[in-house]
Image (spheres, rainbow, N blue to C red):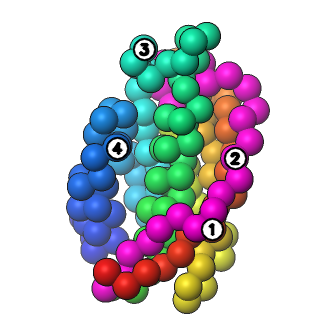
Amino acid sequence: MNDIQGRIAASFASQRLMATLGAELAFVADGEVHIALPFAERLSQQHGYVHAGAITSIVDSACGYAALTRTPAGCEVVTAEFKINFLRPAMGDRFLAIGRVQNAGKLLTVCTGEVRAFVGMAYKVVAIIQATVATVRS
């Protein structure tokens, strides 16, 4: 495990919401992070789809951690704003949130992301996001 992966893994392990949701860190690279979420009835809304709050949480975190891969030591990140579009109901056996850095500045990093809903090996994109992530001193 390299320094970036270790830094992201340690931070992810301390984020209690991800544990509550049952989400797992799936992939870490410079400027890109994937978070996996298995379907669970406890995460569903009244129609049986995974709740928008759970979908938003994993893709917001994927973008935040993608941004963290580009921040200097001694700094952390927090979400400053995001815009999310839900393209279809979140139905699937498992979900994968992918966050990618589009531009990393000294104080603000702009990321894009998507959430894929898998049934077997096939997937459909159920949400897309654009996020602005602020760098803060830890």
Mark 4 and mark 3: Cα distance apart in space: 17 Å
Mark 2 and mark 4: Cα distance apart in space: 19 Å
Q: Which of 138 and 90 is in front in this view?
A: 138
Mark 1 and mark 4: Cα distance apart in space: 20 Å
Which amino acid is tagged 3? Glu
Res 136 seen here:
yes
CB-based contact (under 8 Å), mark 4 and mark 3: no
First in sequence: mark 4 vs mark 3:
4
Q: Which residue is denoted by mark 1 in the rendering?
A: 132
Which amino acid is tagged 4? Leu
Mark 3 and mark 1: Cα distance apart in space: 31 Å
First in sequence: mark 2 vs mark 4:
4
First in sequence: mark 1 vs mark 4:
4
Q: What element carries label 3?
A: helix
Q: Which residue is denoted by mark 4 in the rendering?
A: 17
Residue 36 coordinates in the image, percent (x, y)? 43, 38
Q: Is mark 1 on a helix, strand or loop?
A: strand
Residue 115 coordinates in the image, percent (x, y)? 60, 39
Q: Which residue is denoted by mark 2 in the rendering?
A: 84
Numbered marks: total: 4
Is the residue 24 above or below the residue 74 in the image? above
Residue 5 coordinates in the image, percent (x, y)? 32, 64
Residue drawn 33% across the image and 63% down it: 8
Check the picture and name the quadrant holding the N terminus: bottom left
CB-based contact (under 8 Å), mark 3 and mark 1: no
Which amino acid is tagged 1? Thr
Residue drawn 48% across the image and 79% down it: 135
Q: Which residue is denoted by mark 3 in the rendering?
A: 41
Asked if residue 89 is among those painted magenta in the image, a careful observer would answer yes
Mark 1 and mark 2: Cα distance apart in space: 12 Å
110 displayed left or right of 57 = right
